Image: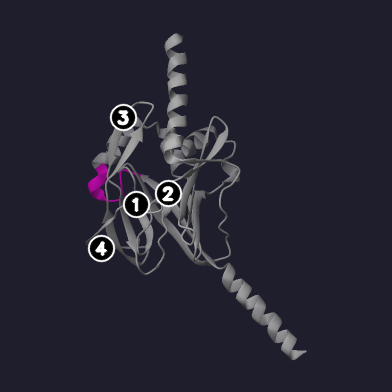
Amino acid sequence: MKFLLFIFILCNTLLLHAQKSTTVIYNIALGGLNSVDMHAKDTIKKDVPSKFLKNQEKIQFSLVFDSISSIYQIVDKLEEKSNHDYRIATIINGGTLVYYKNNKQKEKMYQAELQGQKFNVSVPFQQYNWEITSETKVVNGFKCYKAITTIEKIDKGRETTTILHPVVWFTPDIPSSFGPMGLDGLPGLVLEGTLDGIKYLYATKINLNTTDKVQKPNKGMEVTESEFQDINAKIYREIQKIKNNN
């Protein structure tokens, strides 16, 4: 009887251990977090309605990850469901996107929605060619290193290509290759980062011991990023055609 009790306790302990994950909450800042970015912040605020800026401060995203996979998505706030300006602010800040990564299967994707239809968009597993610098700072009590890279953002609808300079701060103290909004692939968890130099994500809460689960987004059409860009471009051209005919 004692042996069976021991086996029961051991199995439950192993199960609980296997369920452990880390949850990080991120907020958004415009133009960066440092005082040197105040001019950029003021410039951005002139172009963004104050009601959206106010609601943007309420928006939070969660990154949940275990030893294998991660998922990044907006934190649902039931009290804001009826707030029209909040809903618009979430859309502007990518609140409808869900990012997923699986290190074991070498899989990386995000889920997006266009005209009511969901798409599971696959992207290269090694999406960013990071350059790790010697610059450091402390974020939430963790020593972080700065990493930079350069990418091209293609808009097939408008027929434009934009050069972006993503910047992140990651900590080797949390040895995980995950990060917010797909900004990942480094020897440590990304605690701060920006894709375009305008919207800056920063960690406000880190819980290293949670039972939150990582589940891959489903119920979407499987497409490559190039295919998704083609679909997006087609919709954009159709909308422009309707506008021109009116």
- Eye-nearest disc, 3 or 2: 3
Instruction: Pick whichever of labels 4 and 3 is earlier in the sequence.
Output: 4
Q: Which residues are magenta?
A: 30-38
Question: Alpha-carbon distance for marks 1 and 2?
Answer: 9 Å
Which amino acid, by three-letter code, is at mark 2?
A: Met
- Eye-nearest disc, 4 or 2: 2
Which amino acid, by three-letter code, is at mark 4?
A: Thr
> Taking the image as drawn, is residue 216 in sight?
yes
Along the line of sight, which residue is nearer the eye, 52 or 155? 155
Q: Mark 4 highlights which residue? A: 136
Instruction: Pick whichever of labels 1 and 4 is earlier in the sequence.
Output: 4
Q: Find numbered disc 1 in the image and state the secondary structure of the residue it sits on.
A: strand
Q: Find numbered disc 4 in the image and state the secondary structure of the residue it sits on.
A: strand
Residue 224 location in percent, x, y?
Answer: 46, 41
Q: Residue at x 53, y 65 (%)?
A: 21
Local crowd size for mark 3, using a 10 Å CA cut-off: few (<14), some (14–19), many (≥20): few
Image quadrant assignment for residue 190: bottom left
Which amino acid, by three-letter code, is at mark 3?
A: Thr
Image quadrant assignment for residue 17: bottom right
> Taking the image as drawn, is residue 64 in sight?
no
Q: Mark 1 highlights which residue? A: 193
Along the line of sight, which residue is nearer the eye, 30 or 211? 211
